[in-house]
Amino acid sequence: MTSILDRIYASHSNKLLFFKDGWGDLPRLCEMIRRGDQPGAPRPIDVVWSQTRETPDAVFRQGAFLSPYSDMPLPRESEQAFFEMVMPRKAMPETPVCIHLAATGDEGFSRRRQFFALPLLKYGIGSVILENPWYGRRRPAGQQKKMLNHFSDLAAMGGAAAEEGRSLLFWLKKQGYKKTGICGVSMGGSIAARVAALEESPVAMIGCLAAHSASAVFTEGLLSRYLAWDVLDQELGSGEKARAFMREFLDVTNLTRLPAPRKPEASFLVGAKNDGYVPPYSAHLLHSHWPGSSMQWLKTGHVGAFLFHRRHFLEAIRDAFARL
């Protein structure tokens, strides 16, 4: 049963519709369907540091790099990727480091710093918080908060976040860190799962409220009620074509089409039994596709899990790194 809290939150947080200006670069979307998923190797990045702050327990550094993503054009504002690194003061090459990817609408660093990076310092785990393209300092002019104007924006945002996450993992290893991982909540969890599946070396992977494919979220879950379907359908001609096309495109990166991470026992998933955003069957599909992974089910919905069960997310991160 869908959580009542999920339904209330969805109605209040989505006063506008996603993709109000249609598909965007429709020819390129069709070409990506035809071409299929071809991620290639992670690309190296050059990090430029901007500021450093120290406290008795931690060192905070903010940096930037040029996004390595090239499958679709990024808006000018999104071309530069920003991140914050939160490390224990006495960090060493053996210090575990976790990359945190953003959930839908999570802009800036403060939320993930407060809820994840700072508590993880108690476990001796450092963090890298990546700001998503189309969010925060990377949000293009004319976009209202999280409400992406075109569907192609979603396609590029997910692709870019995944490639940036892969490049950050590659960069961390070049910096000498021996135990690395990646995590996220909701959309961030699904993208983290993709990064881990494409990584050639063992990593800790923590997917909280993650879907096996974005198609389950945008064509079946609560968010499907807040898409400009009339505009999308009209652009394809007539009839109910938009939902089918969207599902076909989003399933190009269906995680069950990729192999499991190299060390699936270091992969921890947390699902919500009454999730209105990510259908529970979708989270279960991912767990089933990764034999040896751990799955914890919370008796709540999507919003309730984040509000009241973050300690389970933190425990999953700790336990995942302990399995590396």
Image (spheres, rainbow, N blue to C red):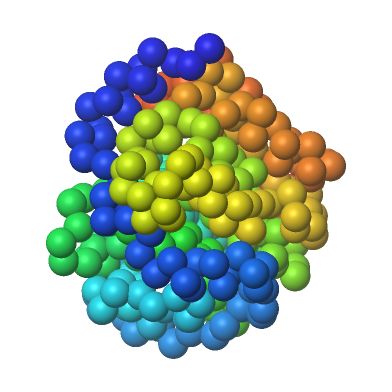
Judge by depth and name the residue closer to the eye, 71 or 161: 71
- Which residue is rendered at x = 20% and y = 34% of the image? 15
Residue 134 screen position, x and y as percent: 30, 62
Q: In this view, does 135 lie above or below 65?
A: above
Note whether residue 27 is visible.
yes
- Which residue is rendered at x = 32% and y = 56% of the image? 22
Left or right? Give the position of 74 relative to 317: left
Left or right? Give the position of 139 relative to 80: left
Residue 55 screen position, x and y as percent: 28, 58
- Which residue is rendered at x = 79% and y = 57% of the image? 259
Residue 2 screen position, x and y as percent: 48, 16
Residue 312 screen position, x and y as percent: 54, 30
Q: In this view, does 185 lie above or below 169?
A: above
Location of residue 26 by image quarter: bottom left
Judge by depth and name the residue closer to the eye, 240 or 272: 240
Note whether residue 127 is visible.
no
- Which residue is rendered at x = 31% and y = 48% of the image? 231
The extreme left residue here reads 142
Q: In this view, does 42 lie above or below 6?
A: below
Image quarter (top left, top right, bottom left or bottom right) of the C terminus: bottom right
Give the number of callouts. 0
The extreme front residue here reads 238
